[in-house]
């Protein structure tokens, strides 16, 4: 999901590194962003980057729109959603003062004068600091929790406060709620004052570290997202992180970092990395300083932003970095040690494909079901084009895992694409080819309405020809939807789970530095991830807005009202085109009714499934709340009810899977703390427990595939219907040739995927 308010981004920085930087720490030294000096002003490079982006978006975007007064108003509206989406910083009077800029953002870009958005951003910083200082002032006298006050926790549709008095009252209630949560968790008044004062003080520090790069990034996000939800501007740092995410590797030391107050701590170490091989770095260690090379000065990084510390530690392969470390068992004031490391290429295996086997025994019959978990469709296009035989690729990894599962004797395979947000379109095509012999996988239409089919155009045999299922949810998007839809349209396997995200567009990544007037300069303009195509299923339908509807539906958690393509105001409409020339390889209808019946009967009496339904019901109930009481007695009653409900859930979990109910008791309750305020040890323990938690949806999917294998084994005629090509592996059907699949494609993405692009030559990669 592209849209992310600045307040949420600031909170995320206090919790952990962003998605790509979080995976490992490395890169070359950059200027740190300590407390900024107001007013912030745009740079010439930022003005150039905005102008170049405007030329590209108004000419080459799939739905190109002029940067005029109407677009300016769209940008204006989204800019304030990013800055103050909850309407807790600005008043109606502020908004009246800003109204003069409502139709001026287009002129600001064309004239290379970004003072309007920067003026607003400067005012945002002042307001944010003022609000936190006001909250701190309220802590001195405490609060009366015997009133009937309520606090609105969902302000998306609220108005901006009328005046300063109304804004103060809003922050009084907001601070009261922070205090009340800690009070309900058993904290004393002194402990609460200390915790909240530190929380608000840390927030002020982070806000004061915002600089012109943050202002420009926020403004350009508003512009790019106003064209469509998946077009994005990426600053130089974000562009590099996007590349790291796609290729699942970087050059560095292999340590995941987290911010804790003014300090940077090591949260995990990558296996076989320089960090872990040194034997000198451990989880919980604090990084106090960073030096480049064998003798470069040690730069004190206490109080630095996390992304700046990461950029100091990152660097080119075979270069040296020195870290001043405070060991975890001694704390920041303990004896320091110096650790010298040589950076290397680090594989980020956390997001790579993984496999496991689920053994099921029912009625004395044992069957093995293989599971492949694929978090994203990754591909190192650079390594591939350079001829690296070991280039990273989702398809290559999955093919290897399928071979291993076959060797273990699995009789069915689940491809788990839950929360897979997409990736390389090329990889989606190739991965589908592991399960069919030949044929189109997806159709791609550009802005000129030219349609091209892409898919598997050779007769290489399938890697897996047996029963299969694809497990999906609302977080399954883009390239994942291409794969799921193709499997469904070919009748190749079952799609099981909740309806998917509904993203049906293709983006291309354009390096803006290629447009520099001086070819020898290094302007650091960043990159533009721009929508250039729309993709369609081979049956002619689109996943746009509608997503993929599973053959067997699982209950959702209700997030579709807030998450998915349909929640965007400017999402492209659903359309359809003519079907591609393809022929289904099987027909799941042959046993789908029986599988549905067996599924319904099993889950009606399954304690684990019923527990999941009850937990989903409770989650929906809590997420649907828009206001909460600030009366202590009422909240205490509600907490006791919640505690009793959670205790019941824990007891039921223990009865089902044997987990110690008491062990999870504390983590199940609201302690009133933000994630970064808990100890790193506690947070890591919770993450580990979450990974080990039972997964009733995956288990049920395995049971459905178990049933499918049983039905196939007992009925040869049915097997001929539901297995590809009648169960005759390697004999592909007569399918018209598929055009357009390049052996060395650009990195297009659908959610993070792609295809042929009409963007200029600077477009070297694409994504969905």
Image (cartoon, rainbow, N blue to C red):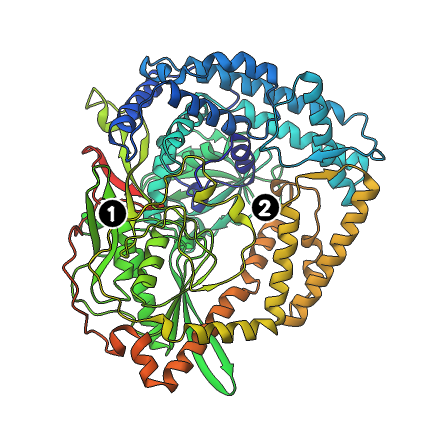
User: Mark number for residue 328?
Assistant: 2
Would you identify the image quadrant in which residue 180 lies? top right
Instruction: Give the spatial CA distance, label 2 vs label 1.
Output: 52 Å
Front residue of this view, candidates 317 and 147:
147
Residue 76: percent from left, percent from top:
45, 22
Tag 2 near tag 1, CB within 8 Å: no
Q: Is residue 392 visible?
A: no
Left or right: residue 164 compared with residue 342:
right
The residue lying at 71 percent from left, 66 percent from top is 651
Looking at the picture, does residue 767 appear above or below residue 128?
Answer: below
Disc 1 residue crowd, few under 14, some 14–19, many 20+, Cα 10 Å: many
Spot occupied by residue 260 in the image (x, y as percentages of width and height)? 58, 38
**From the image, which quarter does the N terminus lie in?**
top left
Location of residue 243 in the rendering, given as x and y in whole percent from the top left corner: 33, 42
| Mark 2 or 1, closer to the camera | 1
Disc assigned to residue 444: 1
């Amino acid at each position: 999901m592209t849209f992310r308010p600045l307040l949420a981004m600031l909170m995320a920085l206090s919790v952990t590194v962003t998605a790509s930087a979080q995976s490992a720490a490395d890169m070359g030294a950059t200027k740190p962003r300590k407390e900024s000096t107001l007013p912030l002003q745009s740079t010439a490079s930022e003005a150039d980057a905005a102008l170049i982006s405007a030329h590209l978006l108004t000419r080459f975007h799939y739905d190109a729109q002029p940067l005029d007064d109407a677009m300016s108003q769209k940008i204006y509206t989204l800019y304030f959603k990013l800055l103050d989406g909850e309407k807790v910083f600005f008043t109606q009077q502020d908004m009246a003062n800003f109204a003069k800029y409502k139709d001026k953002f287009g002129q600001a870009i064309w004239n290379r004068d970004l003072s309007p958005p920067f003026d607003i951003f400067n005012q945002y910083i002042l307001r944010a600091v003022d609000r936190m200082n006001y909250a701190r002032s309220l802590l001195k006298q405490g609060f009366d929790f015997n009133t009937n006050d309520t606090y609105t926790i969902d302000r998306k549709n609220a108005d901006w406060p009328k005046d300063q008095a109304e804004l103060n009252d809003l922050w009084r209630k907001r601070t009261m709620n922070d205090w009340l949560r800690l009070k309900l968790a058993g904290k004393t008044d002194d402990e609460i004052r200390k915790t909240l004062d530190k929380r608000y003080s840390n927030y002020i520090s982070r806000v004061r570290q915002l600089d012109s790069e943050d202002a420009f990034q926020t403004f350009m996000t508003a512009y790019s997202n106003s064209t469509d939800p998946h077009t994005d501007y990426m600053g130089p740092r974000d562009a590099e992180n996007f590349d790291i995410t796609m290729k699942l590797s970087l050059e560095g030391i292999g340590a995941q970092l987290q911010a804790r107050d003014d300090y940077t701590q090591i949260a995990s170490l990558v296996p076989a990395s320089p960090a872990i091989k040194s034997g000198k770095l451990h989880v919980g260690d604090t990084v106090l300083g960073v030096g480049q090379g064998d003798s470069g000065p040690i730069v004190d990084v206490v109080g630095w932003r996390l992304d700046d510390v990461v950029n100091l530690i990152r660097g080119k392969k075979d270069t040296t970095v020195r870290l001043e470390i405070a060991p975890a068992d001694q704390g920041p004031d303990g004896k320091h040690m110096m650790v010298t490391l040589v950076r290397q290429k680090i594989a980020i295996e956390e997001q790579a494909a993984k496999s496991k086997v689920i053994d099921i025994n029912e009625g004395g019959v044992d069957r093995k079901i293989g599971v492949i978990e694929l978090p994203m469709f990754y591909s190192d296009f650079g390594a591939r084009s350079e001829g690296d035989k070991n280039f990273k690729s989702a398809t290559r990894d999955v093919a290897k895992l399928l071979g291993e599962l076959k060797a273990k004797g699995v009789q069915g395979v689940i491809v788990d694409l839950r929360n897979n947000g997409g990736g390389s379109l090329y990889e989606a095509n190739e991965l589908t080819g592991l399960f069919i012999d030949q044929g189109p996988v997806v159709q791609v239409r550009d802005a000129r309405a030219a349609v091209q089919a892409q898919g598997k155009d050779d007769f290489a045999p399938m890697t897996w020809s047996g029963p299969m299922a694809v497990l999906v949810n609302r977080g399954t998007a883009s390239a994942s939807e291409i794969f799921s839809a193709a499997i469904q349209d070919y009748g190749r396997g079952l799609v099981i789970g909740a309806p998917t995200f509904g993203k049906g567009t293709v983006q291309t990544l354009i390096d803006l530095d290629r447009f520099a007037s001086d070819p020898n300069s290094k302007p650091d303009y960043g990159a533009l991830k721009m929508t250039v195509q729309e993709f369609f299923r081979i049956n002619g339908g689109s996943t746009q807005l509608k997503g993929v509807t599973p053959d067997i539906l699982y209950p959702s958690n209700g997030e579709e009202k807030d998450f998915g393509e349909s929640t965007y105001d400017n999402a492209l409409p659903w359309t359809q085109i003519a079907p591609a020339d393809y022929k289904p390889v099987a027909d799941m209808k042959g046993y789908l009714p029986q599988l549905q019946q067996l599924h319904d009967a099993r889950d009606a009496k399954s304690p684990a499934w019923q527990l999941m339904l009850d937990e989903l019901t409770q989650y929906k109930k809590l997420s649907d709340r828009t206001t909460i009481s600030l009366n202590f007695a009422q909240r205490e009653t509600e907490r006791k009810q919640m505690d009793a409900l959670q205790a019941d859930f824990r007891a039921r979990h223990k009865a089902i899977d044997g987990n110690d109910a008491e062990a999870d008791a504390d983590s199940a309750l609201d302690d009133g703390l933000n994630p970064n305020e808990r100890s790193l040890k506690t947070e890591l323990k919770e993450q580990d427990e979450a990974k080990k938690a039972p997964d009733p949806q995956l288990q049920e999917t395995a049971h459905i595939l178990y049933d499918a294998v049983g039905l196939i084994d007992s009925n040869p005629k049915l097997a001929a219907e539901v297995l590809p090509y009648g169960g005759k592996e390697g004999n592909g059907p007569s399918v018209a040739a598929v055009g357009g699949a390049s052996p060395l494609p650009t990195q297009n993405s659908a959610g993070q995927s792609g295809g042929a692009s009409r963007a200029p030559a600077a477009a070297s990669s694409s994504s969905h």
